[in-house]
Structure formats: structure tokens, C-alpha cells
Image: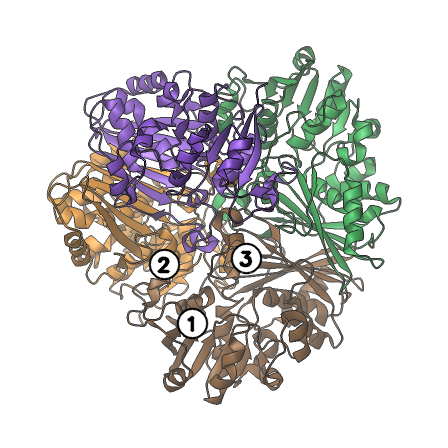
Chain colours: A brown, B green, C purple, D orange
Amino acid sequence: MNVRKVCIAGGSGYTGGELLRLLALHPQAEVVMATSREYVGKPIHYVHFNLRSIYKNLKFSKLDVSLISKNCDAVFLSLPHGTSVDYVPKLLEVGLTVVDLSADFRLKDPQAYKVWYGYEHPYPDLLKKAVYGLPEIHRDEIRGAKLIAVPGCNATASILSLIPLVKCRVIDTDKIVIDVKVGSSEAGSKPSIGDHHPEREGCVRPYDADGHRHVAEVQQELSTIAGQEVVATMVPHAVSNVRGALASSHAWLSIEVEELDVLKAFVETYKGEPFIRIIYKIPPNYPDPKYVIGSNYADLGFALEKRVGRITSFCAIDNLMKGAAGQAIQVFNIAVGFNETLGLQITPLKPA
Amino acid sequence: MNVRKVCIAGGSGYTGGELLRLLALHPQAEVVMATSREYVGKPIHYVHFNLRSIYKNLKFSKLDVSLISKNCDAVFLSLPHGTSVDYVPKLLEVGLTVVDLSADFRLKDPQAYKVWYGYEHPYPDLLKKAVYGLPEIHRDEIRGAKLIAVPGCNATASILSLIPLVKCRVIDTDKIVIDVKVGSSEAGSKPSIGDHHPEREGCVRPYDADGHRHVAEVQQELSTIAGQEVVATMVPHAVSNVRGALASSHAWLSIEVEELDVLKAFVETYKGEPFIRIIYKIPPNYPDPKYVIGSNYADLGFALEKRVGRITSFCAIDNLMKGAAGQAIQVFNIAVGFNETLGLQITPLKPA
Amino acid sequence: MNVRKVCIAGGSGYTGGELLRLLALHPQAEVVMATSREYVGKPIHYVHFNLRSIYKNLKFSKLDVSLISKNCDAVFLSLPHGTSVDYVPKLLEVGLTVVDLSADFRLKDPQAYKVWYGYEHPYPDLLKKAVYGLPEIHRDEIRGAKLIAVPGCNATASILSLIPLVKCRVIDTDKIVIDVKVGSSEAGSKPSIGDHHPEREGCVRPYDADGHRHVAEVQQELSTIAGQEVVATMVPHAVSNVRGALASSHAWLSIEVEELDVLKAFVETYKGEPFIRIIYKIPPNYPDPKYVIGSNYADLGFALEKRVGRITSFCAIDNLMKGAAGQAIQVFNIAVGFNETLGLQITPLKPA
Amino acid sequence: MNVRKVCIAGGSGYTGGELLRLLALHPQAEVVMATSREYVGKPIHYVHFNLRSIYKNLKFSKLDVSLISKNCDAVFLSLPHGTSVDYVPKLLEVGLTVVDLSADFRLKDPQAYKVWYGYEHPYPDLLKKAVYGLPEIHRDEIRGAKLIAVPGCNATASILSLIPLVKCRVIDTDKIVIDVKVGSSEAGSKPSIGDHHPEREGCVRPYDADGHRHVAEVQQELSTIAGQEVVATMVPHAVSNVRGALASSHAWLSIEVEELDVLKAFVETYKGEPFIRIIYKIPPNYPDPKYVIGSNYADLGFALEKRVGRITSFCAIDNLMKGAAGQAIQVFNIAVGFNETLGLQITPLKPA
């Protein structure tokens, strides 16, 4: 077997830890480096207690492009937004395949970085080159790509829930409200008062409710699919799960439609997709992130209320898996020509 | 002091227990009876462990109208939907003040019971007589009323969140989506697979997403306020809190509006209301049920995204308090002429 | 009514917030000052979201002894261990009643501070003068006391669980293991990685298991009661509750004993105690902190396994109430001559 | 590869579901039957929502010994205690390898079933033949065994925590208190009031505290290792995790001992064990079930308090994995001659 040697840059956070967890069992990838500013020299399990006895000799090292270049074929960037952008050009230059989990290369329009992220993007050319790493819509472009920008959990759940509705042209594409509920691991491993256990447990807390920036990529991708501008708005809520994200995408029907037509649109859109599961009229009736925990699945379903002409499409994912590390490995597999599901054949836990 | 003697019919469930908890400290009410089919003869704390040493001599008894009539001035009905309707006429006949926590007398239109609850309402005349027990809009009618139908948690949070928007005529009143998140105590004290701890903990589970019946009363009340038909749709989600409900009411602006105008509408609508608190540009920025737990407060706030013309109004309540027992005592106080806040001056827990 | 004016020093943390919550409803106390280093000038609800609309005009101020002296009759110290000790002498000097929630004056033996807290206590004379604020054993000394050291949650639950067993001389007093389970609010309001929601939720994490310093006060108090040295050891576990602490105190019988004798010892020990509730052969069979949340109750019970001669005594409290702020107000009431239960007649929540 | 065909009898409960989850990825086992009284004819994912799209054609069937005999090489019994005993003789008769997850064949002494389980065991001869399925102490006997009684979570955690201490003869073996904390999935998938979400969430609830029957097998196994009677007592506590069990085994030293000697005893006892991990002076300092969730690991550690001569040994497991289904597959692998870790190479989730 042709094993790829990989580096996890930013390996001490939650998505870094999840990549390490997954790659430990990947039959054709080997983690040979994991970087961390804070934990240089410490063993992996010093931070990731779950990985005790799994990475026996690996220690965190500094992020050093030349060392990565020497030892690795590919690099996963689990760095903060605004940090990846500094490393990506250098990593590409030395020929590495770069799978970036930050937002730094997800938007195509350089102006959008100014509007949504508040900075002038320094590499507009690379934005063109970068592939948006959602396999369900960009699989072909991902093959062989050297720079892939992996979407985060809110965007992944939102886009996946809306593709079939946009494609089958049954909704008003200028009045979509995506109400997202997401667990605490999304906020990362750095303690904060909002995610301090006594404050976070039991909360149902709206945040960034007057304009969440992840909607920018949702609109970008859905507009391409629709062939016209899609206007969406996102209202995320912090809930007290640790893992899991649910997008409840509310839309208004533009034409009369039957449930079976919508179901057909879902089934056809996602035919053959290894990580999409559709729920229709069988328990638990609608997607619930609880039942994808630990896996790369995205569970999809919808509810149609004909009385008022409203349709809600639901997408449930594990925010660290299909919403981050799992998806990153899926696109890595595609990019380097592996079977897409390598290292990702994990059955979700239940109960969990 | 003029103490009212009261009976809790259906005292062994969660709303019954909450009424017992609150009335234990009510300075002008005394619980002299609590009924339960299952626990006749057992002390209150046999079921409500929290009330050990508080109700020392009270035992659960059978629901006997003549006994209630003999011993009580008022009765709270914490009975299942469809059961209250059988008792209410008899209880009214003997002159009792009836505070009904079920849905049996909330809707004005008898036909609506057929549509939403699947039965022919046997007492259409009483529907006219019943007052919808939301003090913020029906305080005057509640005074002296003999039959009050207390709204539940989903409806209370939904209506309170939308009154200011409907009143100030800034939204399309035919495209309102109310996305509700609610804790497990809402489902009542009877075990079920869906609320079995291993299944419920960590869930974010949409239910009745193709048409929840509580929207009927939401539309009824908002239409009256608007002076025209309001079309709303409700998508509830079971989350893993025990207590708490958040309504995120998403609407589309019909005219351009500034944040401060909306704020003004909220402030004016709820001026002088003892249990309404408005949050605007101060932590935690938006209402979160976590910070009203144990109290009768409804916390309100909103988010305006001018980019797309979307406004979301949030209302956070404790589903057993302002969403059930607390509100029941508030309307009882009003009905019998007490100070509205008696027995309800409880500061919420934090953290909890 | 003779209202006492009080200051909460360290009012922005969890015990400070709980004192504010309780005192808002205390009929004979008024909070006229609340200090905080970090939030000077901010309204109370800037930090304690639950108290919005309750403290309308109060703002956090600096800790200034002369100001406190001028405005207040008593002061509650919710300061970190090792900080109270600097303020107490000055506060006593100006004649204030000082209720200290830190550990700085709990131990009688100055040497013990060296052993358990690692510092030389600067005021050994004040240690003699300070009263250990557990009303169930020091009520008489608390009356009129000017300096009261309120025990924390682990010590309170441990001592209360063991007094009857030590008093009735049925156990080996040199082989007591107290296995404590405690919620996240015990750790305070400052974020840390161990209490970061993703790490804390779902944990069952032993800590300080090779010698927890709170055992020092447990041994001190139990030895006095026993009239001989009691040797105890404490193994605390962080669990994922927000509030609540359970001490499971395991001991070995020194003589044969019947359940009813033990029950009698519990009942007699705590006769007339307003906040002690004893559970015996009635659901939920043993104490569970879940059913005291929000209240000042300590629920007590025990299990005797005659087969092996083992007895376990359980004490369940709300760590912020009987384990901190509730107890502080109880001793304050006693100290200044009020009815002991003022401001503390709160029924616990259920479910919560 | 020599694939074994297996049946899961009692496949609709939590341990049955966990077996299905694990065996889906087992390279040398294939689930060809899963039985359920309640769900005959329904697809697997009708109950186990997590397994949607994984078992595509399998449906629940009746428990029919002759059908199992015809189609399978081995059978896993996830049946209630007292039910397995009826099927085991028949299943053995037809030559199947039987892995029983119930308590019906764990005790060697037939009298013990009367004492602890309240019934006369009908097959005392089979008790002799049955192997206690804890690989760490019975690996050799498990090889080729036809009837293996898999220990449950409380017993597994308790025994694993105590073997090194008993072996190295440093503790009093007649004064061991095992304080267990366990998640809600242990109670099974059948709803009950005690495990109803509003009642279970946030609880710390002792149960069977005056004598838990699982201590019988703990004493049986430890006595064999010690070569003398070991007296242990177990006090389990229901906590609000879904998965996870922690045994905190408190013992008193019989001789003076250094930490490094104890560490050595742990290391030597478990040398080469694929699923034992020892934690010593590295974060998180002591075992926490949180960091084994989803995996077959048992994390071990200890705390020595020389001041009082107390040692506590901790064992953290996932109750459905090393405490049930994971261990069942481990013993199945050993019994049929497979590599012991097949299907069990799963890295735990973190955070989860």
C-alpha cells in the first residue's frame, strides 16, 4: 500500500485531536508530525487523553514548513482563522497537498473577506485555486487538488440541507432562515466564560444572530447551484451538547409540491453518497445529531406544512466529523486518489 | 389576610408539583387538597421529593368535585388535554374559580378543536366564557374571571416574542416561522422511550415539525392583536435541558426599520409588566432560558439583520413557570384580586 | 423592622451571586454594596444575568474598608482563599460583623494552615476568636459572633453525614472514607480547561485524591464531637452537574447495630434543625442533591450492610446554598439575632 | 478469511445494539441474525437509529434455537438476567459457542444464586463449565470455551481496579469499599421513572447501597486471586452521564508501601494487555470514563494517602464496551481463536 505521510498543524485543539483520532486507524495514512505552539515536546496524549497508548512515540513539534516538507506528503491545517493564510502559500510551494480547515480559503470573492472577516485577503489568486471541500458538490474538483478549503459545521449542515430544495426549484430563494443548534466543542478547546461548564450547560443561547459570517459560504455555494443569487440568513444557537449540530433550514414554497416529490429530490441529489443518510417516515422521523455522533454521516430529512406553504429541511452532523475532521479526511482521500471512505467507516454511537 | 383555599387537581405531575412548590410560599393561598389517581393516600413528598418536610400533613386524594367544592375557593387543573373538559362545567357550577392548565379551553373557535385536537368540543359556550390566561394581553378580562385557560410554554414564548412586532406592523404577518427549543420536563412525568435519559440527553430532535397544534392559539391571539389574520408556523425541537424553552421567531420585514424603533416597540408593549425583562446590547445579548430557571420571568430580545430584512425575536421562559404553573398563579392572583406577583417573587438560579 | 445593611465583598463570583440572589428577598437585610475588582461600575446584572430587573441601581464598587464601615452593619466575604485573611482584621476593627466564606479562619490550629494551605497564618489569635459556621453544631457560639468562618460544600456535607455516627459511637473512627461527588459550580466562575464545557460535561473525574485539604476541618470538627481523634480521608470527584454535592461517607461498624438505632441517632441529632431532612425507606431511598437544588436543605440518609459491617452515610446539598451562600445567610441570621430561616424559605426545584 | 456467523439474541436493547455496532466492522464475523420479541420483522435501524444504512437487509427475528443452530457458529445473549439460563443449555447442545452477557452463569457457587438473585439455579453443572469472561484473568480458559459468562460493568471495573492491590498483598482484604458511579445506559433501554430524563439528568443517586449483588462476583474472582476470602462491598451511584462507569475502590494499607511499588504492581499485572491503560502523574491524573467512551479500554490509576494509610484504585470504562459488548467480542475473539482485538480497535472520542 502506498501510505501517505501527513502532518497535523495545530494538533492540540479539538479538530486536531479528531484528525489524530481518525488517522490512527487510517490504513493508508500515517501521522508523522503534529504541531502545537503550546505543547512542543509533549506526547500526544498529554493533551488528548483519549489517545493514550495509541500514539506511542509521537510528540508535538513546532510548525516548521521545511520539516513538514521533508517528512510529509500532505498537511492538515487546524489553525485559527487568519493564521492558515500565512502558511498556505509556503506549504503549496514545497509541493504539499494542503487540507485547510480554517475559513481562510473558502470564499471565492476577495471582497467578501473584507465584509465578513474584516481583513483584506492577501492571496486573491489562491482563492481561485482553492477548492471548496464539500465532496457532495465538488468531488471532481477535489480530485488531485493541492489546496482544499474544508467547510465548517454550520456551513456544511446548512448547505447539505438546502441543495435538494434549491435544485428542485420549489422554494423562494430569497427568504431562507437557517436556525442552527450546535454543541460546545464547536467553540474549540480554549476556555472562555461563555463555554465555562456552569454557564454553558443547560443553555439555549443565540449568538451572532444579527449576521453570522458562515452564511457567506452558504450563499456562495447555493447561488452557484441555483444559477441565481440565493439569500439566506443564519441564526446559530449554542446548546448544551458537546458534539453535534443541527441545521433547521426554513423556507417558503414557491410552488405547490407533494412530499414524495421532495423526497425524490433528496434521494436523487444524494444518490451514491457514502455519508448521506435520508430519514423519511421512520423513527426518529427527523435527523438528530445524537445519532451520528462519532461518525462522518450527515442525516437529512424534511417537514412540509402545506397549510402554510412552509418547508423545513434538517441536516444533523457531528460538528467535529462531517463538520470538520471527518470531512477533511474525506476530501484528503479524494484528493490523493484513495477510496473516499478510508478511515471513516465508523458506526455512530447510540446511546451516547 | 384573606387566604384562598385551593385544590391542585392532577397534583402528581410536573406542573402539579410546581404549583405545590409555589403555593407553599404563597402568603394568601393555602393548598388544602391535591388529587392524583395513582397516589391516593400517599404524602406529597412520596412523589415530589423536593417537598419533603414542606407539606407535612397533606396527602393525595381522589378528584371529587363535591369535596373540592366544600373545601376550596379555587381549583388548578393540571390534567391531561381532553380530561379537563369533563370537569370544568361541574367545577364552575359549584362556584369555584377554575384555572385550567390544559388546552381544553384555549381556542375560541369550536371547529379548531376538530382540526387540531381531533375532537368535537362539547361546550362551545364555555369557550366563549373562558379567558385566555396570558396577563400581558388579557389582564382586564382575567380580573374576576371564573374560567381561565392558561397557555402552555410553546404558545406563551411564541406569542410574547411576537406581540411587539405584530403591533408595530413591521413584519410580513404571513411568513412567520417560530423555531422552538424546549427541555424534557415539558413532556411530563410519564416515562417514554423518547424521554428515556439515554435517548433524550444530548438530543436536538425536531418533533411535530409538519404542523404543531399549539400554533393554533398563537395565530388566534396574534390575529386579534393585528386586526388581521396572522399566519405562523411552529417547529419545536426537543433539547437536553430539563427546564427552559426558547422561541426564536423568525420574520421578514415589511418595511425598513431601525433597531431602536424595534426596541421602543418592545419597551412600550411591556411597560410595567412585572415578569417581562428586555435584553438589548448587554450580556448575554439575547435571551437564554438558562437565566430564568425557577422564576416566572420571560426574557425578551431581538436581532435585526438589515442585509436581508430578517428579524428574529427571542423569548426565553422556564416552561414549568411562565410556561405553566407560574403563569397559572399569576392569573389566579389577578382573577381573585390579589397582587399579581404574590408567591412569584423568586429570583432565578445562576448557574443552574 | 430592623434592617441590616450588608456588603458582599467579591460579589461577581458564584457564591457572591448566590448571596445577591438570596438577599434580594431577605426581609431584614439590604445589600447596599457589592464589590468586584473586575467589574467596578457595572450593574449587578452585567455579570449575574439572572438578577436583571432585581437590583436596579446597585453597581459593583471597589473593596474599600472605610466605605463598607460607613454604609454597612455586616459584610460577607466571597473572596479567594488567602485573600480574606488580609481584610478580616480591618473589618473587625471597624465593628462589622464578618461572615467569611473562605477557608482562612476555619481551622483552629495555626500549624494546620502550614500543612494544608502552605502558609503561615498571620493572625493565630483571630483563629481562636472565629466561630466555625456550621449551625448544627455551633449555633450558640454563632449568636453574637463577629467573625464566622463558613464551611464549604465538601466539609459541610461530610461533617453533617458523620455527626450521628460519631456521636452514637458505632463506627471505627480511624477508617472513614468520604467519597464526594460535586458539580461544576464549586470550582468558581473563572474559566479553566478542566471546567471547559467539552471537558467537564460527562466527566467523573477524581481530583486531589491523595489528600484533599478540606478533610482538615472535617477531622477538626468530628474529633471535637467524638472527644477523640477522628481520622478521615476524602476523595472528591468532579461530576457533570452544575449544582449539587453528595458525600458518601463509608465507615466500618465497631459494634453490631440495627438500622433503627442508626435512624434514631440521625433523628435525635438533628431534631428541630430547620434545614435537615432525613430520608429513610421512602423514595428516593437515599439523598440525591438533585432534590435540594436552589434550597438550603441538607438531605441525610444511610445504608447499612450488616453482611460486611459497613455503613455509608449520605449527605446531599446544593453546594452554593447549604455549601456556601445559604449557610452564610443562616449564620448571619443567627449572629445578628434574626430568625434563622429568614430569606432561606425556598423550596427546591423538581425537576431541575 | 474464516468468517464466523453470529446471532445477537436480544438485539434491540443497548448491549444488543452495541454488539451490532461493533460487529458491523468486525473483519471476521458477520451478524446473520438478531432477535427481538418486540420488533420482529422490523429493520435494525428501526430501533438503532445510528445503524441506518449499515445493516441494509437484516431484520429482527424471533429467538428460535434451531434457526440459530442452522445459520450461526456463535450466539451472543443480550437477554435479561434469568432469561439466558433457559436458552443456554439448548444452544450449547446444538454446538454453538455461547457468549452470555447476563449474570446467569457468572457465579460458581449455585447457593450464591439463591442469596443474591433469589432463585435456585437449575444448571449447577453448567456453572462449573462456564468461564468467567474477564480476559485479564481467564484468557487461557476462554480459549476454546463454549460458554462464557461476560461480567457486567460494575464488576469489570471493580475487579480490574483491585487485582494489582490484592496480588501485591498491600491492603486489608476485608475492608474494601467500592464506590461506583455509572451512566444511564447501564439501566437498559426500557423507560422507567428513575431514568426518565427530567429525573435522571443531574442526579447523583445511590442505589442498592445496602448490598449490591454484583459484589458477589467481585468477591469470587478476587478471592481466587488472593488465595483467601476477600470481603468487598459496593455502593453504586447513578450519575447523569449516558455512558461510562468509574469504580473508586477504597482500601486500607496492611503494610507501608511506596507509590512506585504500587505502580509497579499495576504495570506488571497488566503487561501486554491490549485494553488496559495505566495513568500515573500525567493529565488527567486519574482515570475518567469520559476518555474511554466508545472504546474497549479500561483506564486504571490509583491514589495513595500515606497520612492515613488509604489507597484508592480507580478503573474507568465505557459500560457498554469493556463493561458489556466490547468485552463480549473480546472473549468471543479469544474463544474462537481470532486476534483478540479484532473489531475493537476503536479510538475513544474526545471530547464527547
Q: Which residue is drawn at the image coordinates 62% and 74% (left, top)?
A: A119
Q: Are marks 2 and 1 on the same chain?
A: no
Q: Secondary structure at mark 2?
A: loop
- Dot 2 surroundings within 10 Å: few (below 14), some, or many (20 or more)? many
Q: Which residue carries the number 1 mark?
A: A343
Residue type at mark 1?
Gly
Q: Which mark is residue D24?
A: none
The x and y percentages for residue C264 are 32, 16
Q: Is residue A147 above or below residue C178?
A: below
Q: CA distance from mark 2 to mark 1?
A: 16 Å
Which part of the image, by quadrant, shows the N terminus of chain D? bottom left
- Mark 1–mark 3 distance (CA, rounded to whole Å): 21 Å
Decide which of tag 1 and tag 3 comes sooner along the chain.
3
Any mark on residue D295, and which?
Answer: 2
Q: Which residue is mark 3?
A: A289
Distance (Cα) linking label 2 and label 3: 20 Å
Horizontal side, residue B98 vs residue D225: left or right: right
Which part of the image, by quadrant, shows the C terminus of chain D? bottom left
Q: Secondary structure at mark 3?
A: helix
Task: Specify the quadrant of the image occupied by residue A261.
Answer: bottom right
Q: Chain of mark 1?
A: A
Instruction: Give left or right: position of B141 versus B245.
Output: right
* Picture coordinates of residue C70, whole percent (x, y): 54, 32
Q: Amino acid at mark 2?
A: Ser
Residue D40 image offset from top left, x and y in percent: 49, 50
**Amino acid type, mark 3:** Pro
Packing grade of label 3 (10 A; few <14, some 14-19, many >=20) is: many
- Mark 1 falls on what kind of element? loop
Provide the chain ID for the residue under circle 3: A
